[in-house]
Image (cartoon, rainbow, N blue to C red):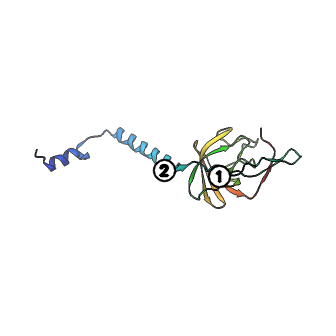
Amino acid sequence: MNINRRQLWRAASIGSYRFPTTGLVVAVLVLGVLLVVATITGGGSVRDLPAPVNAAAPQALGNGQYLYSPRSSRVTIGTHYRFQLYTHCGLDWPIAVDFDGSFWDPTGPGPASDGNGNPPRGYGDPLDYGVMTLLSPNRAEYRSARGPVMRFSRHPGAQRASPCA
C-alpha cells in the first residue's frame, strides 16, 4: 500500500475543516472554566488531611467555657488539602479552624461572620467543603468549593470557647 504523505498530512490538518464560530467560543469557554477549576483545586493534586494526632477532650473551666487543644496533624507548606470547615458559629469562633496542629484566626478578605455568629454569605452552614493550604508557617488559606476565600493566621496554643449550638 502506497500512502502519499502529503495527502495524509492535508487530511489531518485542522485548516481543512470548517468549525462554526459558536462551537469555537463554547470550546474556549469550557477550557477556561477547566483552567479556573484546576487553579483553585491545585490541578488535581488535592490531598486528604493526615489523621489527627491529639484526642484530648476539652477541659471544663467551670464558667461555661472549655479549654480546647488542637487535634490536627502537621501538614506540608504549599500542599492543598481537602478541608471540612465548621462554619455554623462563624469563621471567627475560636475553634472553627483546626489545621496544621493549631487553631487559626481569620484575617480576610471579607467578614468572618454575619455579625450574629453565623457564617458569612457564600459559605455552607453548618459545614463548608473546600481546600486548605498552608502558605507559610503562620499563614493559611481556605478556598471554598462555593467560591469564597478566607486567609488565616496561626493562633498559638489552646483556645477558650463556649460550646457552639
Q: In which quadrant of the rendered image does the C terminus lie?
A: top right
Q: Amino acid under label 1?
A: Pro
Q: Image point 35% across, 39% down: which residue?
A: 23
Q: Which residue is the extreme one toward the left?
A: 2
Residue type indicated by callout 2: Gly
Image mark for residue 43? 2
Q: Give percent across and percent down for residue 3.
A: 13, 46
Question: Do labels 1 and 2 touch, CB within 8 Å?
Answer: no
Residue 76 placement (x, y as % from top left): 59, 58
Residue beneath label 1, please?
A: 109
The residue under the point 55% across, 49% down is 47
Q: Position of residue 95 (x, y in %)?
A: 74, 48
Label 1 neighbourhood size at 10 Å, few (<14), some (14-19), many (20+)? Answer: few
Q: Which quadrant, please, contains the N terminus?
A: top left
Q: Is residue 122 visible?
A: no
Q: Does dot 1 land on a helix, a strand or a loop?
A: loop
Sequence-wise, the earlier of marks 1 and 2 is 2
Between circles 1 and 2, the one closer to the viewer is 2
Residue 124, picture quadrant = top right
Seen from the viewer's position, the closer of residues 104 and 32 is 104
